[in-house]
Image (spheres, rainbow, N blue to C red):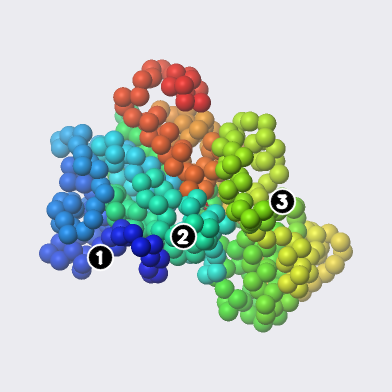
């Protein structure tokens, strides 16, 4: 794990994640990044329970910013949690910070074996396009100088340090396999057992299942094929010509990197608006924030135009990759055993194909009727039509910032306030009425 860059300020404590480092608590599951607060009841159904211990006393020699009334509202006789958050990425952790400050009894569950796993598994040279001053979660600044671009491992380290600093109750290695409603509460089936909660927040990320077109199946088995989600670095790619399919941020960056020692063709299906990282001496995010573009709500006219234009390409462009020697072709229209056919009639027989063709969401594990239409979540600002079931971190959940590291906190703050039992609204409200009542739209 990469150390966090030093900023001169005292850094957050490193997470103590292993059973070994917990001394006498060796029976603790190794996947518990931080124990649940002492007042959270141990759900009896778990086969490996999140054993509790008094974190703040156990780590009293280290700095802790956990809220002092953490878990205060707990009722020791009730095994139903207030909230279960599914997903401990930036969205889940930002919400957890608010839930902790509200003193709610909650757990954050994540399938991954470590915090920051999503980021750590992205390609080696990946750096954020959002500079460090725009990458903070609530309560803890990203520990890097302004106008620097953190690596993906710095982000992973930051998320782990964040959970540790606020003693957020994260249960790792716990995949949710089914979510259903039972007698007015939610049953969350996991690889470790069943948990129950009155409210559930799905924060499983906007980029879940890699999308590869069916034509990939036509290529001869000797052609190496991978999705951009599996790409790590040029050493992984055998000698010979490479076709990168898709010219979004990932496709452009991967094509440019491979052009150093491979013959690379980039197939461009559609061209998104490409903007330079810096304009007139300022980072693009300075301009986007100044012009309030990241705060435009999804239903505004400008936001609809932005959504129709596809995702912004930041810091790279077709011109720039062409300068690095990449051949630019139009979209791939078909494949045969021998190779690929492009819309301009060109044929190519690559050794490797990298599908930078995006992701889709997968909510097949959510067995709650009325939630999805055409596989998409029906919601308003993350509030679904199912009382108690919420989403966070969706692309354009509320604004363009909804799925960005340094901006998801706005949706997290709003959702935490909305979910709070004392939020004044009628239980008969539809989400839209509730939003109006709270004057939060
Ligand atoms: C290549 C790339 C570069 C990006 N660069 C930037 C950037 O520079 N700046 C920026 O602000 N944003 C960037 N983003 C966008 C965004 O910040 C990231 O995608 C971010 O990872 C989203 O965070 P999240 O918490 O919503 O989801 P994720 O980080 O995907 O976290 C979701 C978590 O849910 C868990 N999970 C999923 N399903 C289950 C389940 N069934 N049970 C239990 N756990 C589950 C996963 O293990 C995961 O840990 C980038 C995205 C990509 C793909």
Distance from the alpha carbon under mark 3 to that under mark 1: 44 Å
Q: Is residue 374 above or below residue 149?
A: above
Nearest the viewer among 411 and 169 is 411
Q: Residue at x 48, y 52 (%)?
A: 133
Instruction: Give the residue number, with chain letter if any, for mark 2.
Output: 145
- Foreground of the two, 314 or 177: 314
Left or right: 369, with 317 as reference point: left
Left or right: 87 as drawn, with respect to 209: left
Q: Is mark 3 within 8 Å of ligand 1?
A: no
Callout 2 touching callout 3 (CB < 8 Å): no
Residue at the outermost left position: 24
Distance, label 2 to label 3, CA atoms, is: 30 Å
Looking at the image, which is closer to me, 371 or 124?
A: 124
Query: Disc number at residue 126?
Result: none
- Taking the spot 44% from the left edge, 18% from the top edge, the residue there is 437
- Residue 434, image quadrant: top left
For the residue carrying disc 2, how many other residues have a C-alpha within 10 Å: few (<14), some (14-19), or many (20+)?
Answer: some
Whole-percent x and y of residue 57? 14, 53
Q: Which residue is mark 3?
A: 272
Q: Residue at x 30, y 45 (%)?
A: 107
What separation in Å lies between label 1 and label 2 (alpha carbons)?
31 Å
Mark 1, residue position: 18
């Amino acid at each position: 794990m990469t150390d966090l860059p030093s900023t001169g300020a005292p850094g957050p404590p490193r997470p103590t994640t292993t059973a070994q480092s917990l001394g006498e608590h060796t029976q603790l599951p190794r996947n518990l990044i931080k124990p649940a607060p002492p007042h959270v009841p141990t759900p009896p159904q778990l086969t490996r329970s999140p054993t509790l211990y008094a974190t703040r006393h156990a780590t009293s020699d280290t700095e802790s910013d956990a809220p002092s009334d953490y878990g205060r509202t707990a009722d020791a006789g009730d095994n139903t949690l207030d909230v279960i958050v599914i997903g401990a990425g930036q969205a889940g952790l930002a919400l957890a910070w608010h839930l902790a400050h509200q003193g709610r009894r909650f757990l954050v569950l994540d399938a991954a074996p470590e915090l920051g796993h999503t980021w750590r598994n992205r390609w080696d040279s990946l750096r954020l396009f959002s500079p460090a001053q725009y990458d903070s979660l609530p309560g803890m600044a990203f520990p890097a100088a302004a106008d620097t671009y953190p690596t993906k491992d710095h982000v992973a380290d930051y998320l782990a340090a964040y959970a540790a600093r606020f003693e957020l109750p994260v249960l790792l290695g716990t995949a949710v396999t089914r979510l259903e409603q039972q007698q007015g509460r939610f049953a969350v089936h996991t690889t470790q057992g069943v948990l129950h909660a009155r409210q559930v927040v799905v924060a499983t990320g906007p980029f879940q299942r890699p999308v590869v077109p069916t034509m990939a199946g036509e290529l001869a088995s000797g052609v190496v094929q991978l999705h951009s989600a599996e790409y790590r670095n040029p050493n992984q790619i055998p000698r010979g010509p490479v076709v990168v399919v898709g010219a979004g941020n990932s496709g452009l960056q991967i094509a440019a990197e491979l052009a150093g020692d491979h013959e690379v063709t980039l197939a461009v299906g559609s061209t998104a608006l490409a903007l330079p990282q810096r304009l007139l001496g300022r980072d693009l995010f300075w301009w986007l924030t100044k012009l309030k573009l990241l705060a435009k709500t999804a239903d505004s006219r400008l936001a609809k135009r932005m959504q129709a234009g596809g995702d912004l390409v930041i810091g790279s462009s077709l011109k720039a990759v062409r300068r690095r020697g990449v051949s630019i072709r139009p979209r791939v229209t078909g494949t045969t055993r021998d190779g690929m056919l492009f819309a301009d009639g060109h044929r190519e027989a690559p050794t490797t194909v990298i599908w930078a063709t995006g992701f889709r969401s997968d909510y097949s594990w959510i067995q709650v009727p009325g939630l999805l239409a055409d596989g998409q979540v029906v919601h308003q600002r993350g509030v679904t039509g199912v009382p108690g079931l919420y989403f966070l971190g969706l692309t354009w959940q509320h604004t363009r910032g909804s799925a960005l590291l340094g901006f998801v906190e706005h949706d997290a703050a709003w959702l935490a306030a909305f979910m709070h039992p004392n939020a004044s609204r009628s239980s008969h409200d539809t989400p839209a009425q509730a939003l109006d009542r709270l004057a939060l739209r």
